[in-house]
């Protein structure tokens, strides 16, 4: 009766002969379970289906009618010398090994197939657990990235709010200075033209003579505020807006890059920027000019339009 070697068992279970030979060779012909474990671990290797070339002096398996070369052991010979690795014999009650019958071979193959299904199920469960862990890691990274983006947005909003408060305070002080100047002018005109008699004229001439010195007593006129930042609001193609703060010396190209990265403009869509009031379409030459030179300081509204 023909022997059922490890290689033959794998072939009867439906494994490709090339893969089966590799499994037996790489596990040292230690038995069917080790060979099955090797096949399942390496089934996705890129070179798994490359032709197997046995080392010199070792020939795996072989058909019944094939005769191995002298001095080259076959798989059956190797199996007889390996303790616990022979699946082609069974020991009877008298302690004598005998070849397996056809029914015993089929039963052995059935047990091995069941073992393979169990191992495959364990592997699928392990891969599923690994996939769940990868998904959890991906979600954690997404949450951390969202928190970083939210913090950056909060910082920008805080900076913008501080800028608005400073601008309101400066405007308030400027209006107060204008009101005080108007009040002084009215008082001087009243003193100069309020009386109709000679006494009043003589009396009013004194303040009039002193009036040239009044600017000196009031101190130098207020200087114009020099802004080093610009608050830019951009209206996108869909009508939504984004707002951020740029340095006054940054080129207009910086605004364009910010819109490309943070706006919802479709990828590959070419666009340009324009000022609505007064209407002005910015050219490629304008992109290299600072915001201050283009009159976009301390704040401005730009509109995105398709080219």
Image: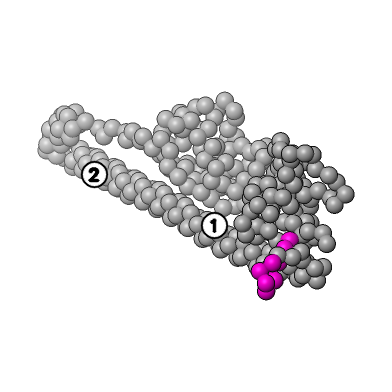
Q: Residue furthest bottom?
A: 93
Choose top left, top right, bottom left or bottom right for residue 31: bottom right
Q: Which residue corresponds to the image point at 40% horizontal and 52% vertical from the top-left? A: 151
Residue 264 spot, x, y in % from top left: 60, 48
Q: Which mark is residue 134?
A: 1
Residue 258 spot, x, y in % from top left: 52, 40
Q: Which residue corresponds to the image point at 33% horizontal and 48% vertical from the top-left? A: 162
Q: Residue under circle 2?
A: 180
Magenta stretch in the rendered image: 88-96
Horizontal arrangement in the rendering, residue 71 relative to residue 211 (left or right) = right
Q: Earlier in the sequence, mark 2 or mark 1?
A: 1
Q: Secondary structure at mark 2?
A: helix
Q: Which sits in the foreground, 222 or 290?
A: 290
Task: Give the distance between the C-alpha atoms of the residues marked 2 and 1, in whole angstroms.
Answer: 69 Å
Image vertical order of residue 25 relative to residue 118, above or below: above
Q: Which residue corresponds to the image point at 47% horizontal and 58% vertical from the top-left? A: 140
């Amino acid at each position: 009766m023909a022997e059922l070697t490890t290689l033959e068992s794998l072939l009867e279970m439906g494994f490709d002969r090339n893969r089966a030979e590799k499994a037996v060779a790489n596990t040292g012909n230690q038995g069917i379970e080790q060979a099955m474990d090797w096949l399942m671990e390496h089934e996705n290797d890129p070179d798994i289906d490359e032709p197997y070339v046995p080392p010199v002096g070792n020939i795996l398996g072989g058909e019944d009618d094939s005769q191995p070369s002298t001095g080259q052991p076959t798989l059956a010979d190797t199996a007889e010398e390996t303790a616990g690795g022979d699946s082609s014999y069974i020991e009877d009650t008298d302690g004598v090994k005998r070849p397996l019958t056809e029914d015993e071979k089929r039963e052995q193959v059935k047990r091995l197939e069941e073992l393979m299904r169990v191992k495959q199920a364990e592997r699928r469960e392990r891969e599923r657990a690994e996939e769940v862990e990868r998904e959890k890691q991906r979600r954690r990274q997404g949450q951390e990235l969202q928190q970083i983006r939210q913090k950056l947005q909060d910082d920008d909003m805080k900076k913008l709010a501080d800028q608005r408060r400073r601008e309101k305070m400066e405007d308030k002080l400027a209006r107060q200075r204008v009101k005080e100047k108007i009040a002084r002018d009215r008082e001087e005109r009243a003193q100069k033209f309020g009386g109709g008699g000679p006494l009043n004229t003589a009396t009013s001439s004194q303040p009039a003579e002193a009036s040239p010195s009044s600017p000196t007593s009031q101190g130098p006129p207020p200087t114009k505020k020099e802004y080093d930042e610009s608050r830019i609001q951009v209206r996108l193609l869909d009508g939504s807006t984004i707002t951020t703060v740029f340095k006054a010396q940054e080129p207009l190209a910086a605004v364009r890059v910010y819109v490309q990265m943070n706006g919802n403009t479709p990828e590959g869509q070419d666009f340009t920027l324009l000022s609505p009031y007064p209407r002005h379409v910015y050219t490629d030459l304008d992109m290299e000019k600072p915001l201050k030179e283009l009159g976009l300081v301390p704040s401005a509204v730009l509109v995105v339009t398709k080219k």
